[in-house]
Image (tube, rainbow, N blue to C red):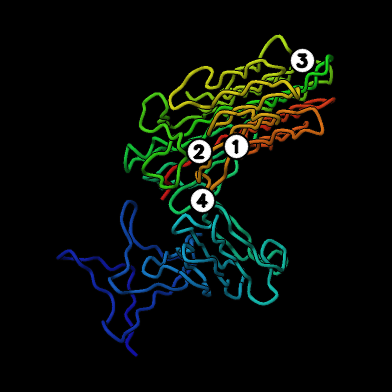
């Protein structure tokens, strides 16, 4: 074996210094300290070459050419894009040794719908627990490092927000469900619809579909003079269906009228869900109005109260309340909007003494001969993904054994004294020798395209 010993090798000409014998040869540098390159220089691997023995720097090699759509086993040092749009599946971690690293990211932003399960090898642990871990946050990405057999794989980095940008609306608040390509936010009580990003794909997508139903009024108790109570009016019903969020809307769809539309921006929208009118004590002459519901520029008026007085009629409101002894029903669609948010209550009757019915979003109340007033019907919409009827009027009470009035479809309370259904805006039924029924609370629903 030949051997040459020198203190330095200095290039004399050209721009490339070659050390080594080429293919199938090995060049060994034997020293306690080896320096490659110079300050400000670059040390590179040749095209197609690989490295070993240098260890990892806390990063992974992302497998961009192999998007995962079904259960698979990860390898140390690799990162994966998991597409769960077709269904949930599992990423099995490799047998871990100290320093191993694996990453995964939600490729289609569907972890919240179809989870990705992370399972350790054999009896190894994830965060000190020998059980699978589930990733269920939209846009989530995580990095696991194997530390030791006590803690196993530790999650050293977790992103639970989507920072890639989106051509669609991104929002939170209320109870969130999906229907096709649409997200639906349902508020059954006060809350905030928070928009973090608007659509950059199509400006028209920022005009959202919405349903705003106010609280129904409460039915009148029977009066001290024995006049039976009128049923209450339903809460106002206002809806806009954007053509970009397909579903079967109610006949009261106010699109495309400008005063009815809401075009959102990246901000927070306080939501008010109107309470139903409280049940009035026996012996008074009227029930109570429901409270308004509000989303952005849209306000639906609370339902009108039922009346049992012989001196004044039912209360005005989203839909009007029923009158007492020969007194008129309340005026619906108060204050007026177009399409009308509700209808009139009906007058009370005599022989027998009976209360009128409360109006509903779909029709006025009626007081047939000899029968307590029937509440006006509500209207149905599929804005939440399936048809639901809301905003029915309450029925009026009648001197027994004559028949009481029935509540209108969509949550109207029948007489005597039944409450309107919660989150429908139904009016309460009139009372018979007792208190009238409370009104049903309202609801606010917002629907938009999210993919």
Whichever of callouts 2 and 4 sits on the residue coming sooner in the sequence is 4
Residue at image mark 3: 285
Question: Residue drawn 25% across and 65% down?
Answer: 10
Q: Position of residue 198 (x, y in %)?
A: 40, 37
In which quarter of the view is residue 153 placed?
bottom right
List the residue tagged with mark 1: 187
Cβ–Cβ under 8 Å for marks 4 and 3: no
Closer mark to the observer between disc 3 and disc 2: 3
Q: Earlier in the sequence, mark 4 or mark 1?
A: 4
Residue 407 location, quadrant? top right
Q: Nearer the viewer, residue 336 or 260?
A: 336
Numbered badge on residue 247: none
Residue at screen point 60% across, 43% down: 175
Find residue 107 and report its horizontal and vertical position in percent.
Answer: 44, 59
Q: Is residue 446 left or right of residue 328?
A: left
- Report which residue position mark 4 lands on: 178
Residues at badges 1 and 2 in contact (C-beta under 8 Å)?
yes
């Amino acid at each position: 074996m030949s051997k040459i010993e020198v203190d330095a090798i200095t290039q004399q000409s050209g721009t490339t210094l070659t050390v080594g014998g080429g293919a199938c040869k090995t060049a060994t540098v034997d020293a306690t300290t080896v320096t490659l390159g110079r300050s400000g220089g670059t040390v590179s691997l040749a095209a197609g070459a690989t490295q070993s023995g240098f260890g990892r720097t806390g990063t992974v090699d992302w497998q961009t050419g192999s998007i995962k759509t079904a259960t698979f086993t990860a390898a140390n040092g690799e990162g994966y894009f998991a597409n769960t749009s077709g269904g949930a599946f599992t990423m099995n971690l490799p047998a871990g040794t100290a320093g191993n690293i694996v990453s995964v990211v939600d490729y289609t932003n569907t972890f919240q719908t179809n989870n990705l399960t992370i399972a350790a090898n054999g009896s190894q642990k994830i965060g000190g627990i020998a059980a699978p871990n589930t990733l269920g946050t939209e846009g989530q990405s995580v990095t696991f490092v194997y530390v030791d057999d006590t803690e196993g794989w530790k999650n050293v980095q977790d992103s639970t927000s989507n920072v890639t940008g989106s051509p669609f609306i991104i929002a939170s608040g209320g109870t969130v469900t999906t229907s096709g390509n649409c997200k639906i936010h349902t508020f059954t009580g006060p809350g905030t619809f928070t928009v973090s990003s608007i659509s950059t794909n199509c400006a028209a997508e920022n005009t959202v579909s919405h349903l705003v139903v106010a609280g129904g009024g409460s039915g009148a108790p029977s009066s001290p003079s024995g006049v039976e109570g009128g049923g209450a009016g339903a809460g106002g019903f206002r809806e806009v269906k954007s053509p970009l969020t397909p579903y079967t809307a109610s006949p009261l769809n106010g699109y495309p009228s400008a005063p009815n539309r809401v075009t959102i921006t990246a901000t927070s929208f306080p939501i008010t869900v109107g309470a139903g009118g409280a049940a009035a004590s026996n012996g008074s002459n009227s029930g109570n109005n429901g409270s308004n519901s509000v989303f952005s520029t849209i306000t639906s008026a609370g339902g009108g109260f039922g009346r049992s007085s012989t001196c004044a009629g039912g209360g005005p409101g989203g839909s009007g309340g029923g009158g007492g002894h020969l007194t008129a029903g309340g005026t619906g669609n108060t204050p007026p909007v177009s399409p009308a948010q509700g209808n009139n209550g009906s007058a009370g009757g005599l022989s027998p003494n009976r209360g009128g019915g409360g109006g509903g979003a779909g029709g006025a109340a009626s007081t047939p001969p000899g029968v307590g007033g029937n509440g006006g019907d509500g209207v149905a919409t599929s804005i939440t993904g399936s048809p639901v009827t809301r905003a029915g009027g309450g029925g009026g009470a009648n001197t027994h054994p004559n028949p009481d009035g029935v509540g209108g479809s969509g949550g109207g309370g029948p007489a005597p004294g039944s409450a309107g259904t919660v989150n429908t805006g139904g009016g309460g039924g009139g009372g018979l020798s007792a208190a009238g029924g409370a009104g049903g609370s309202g609801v606010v629903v917002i629907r938009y395209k999210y993919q």
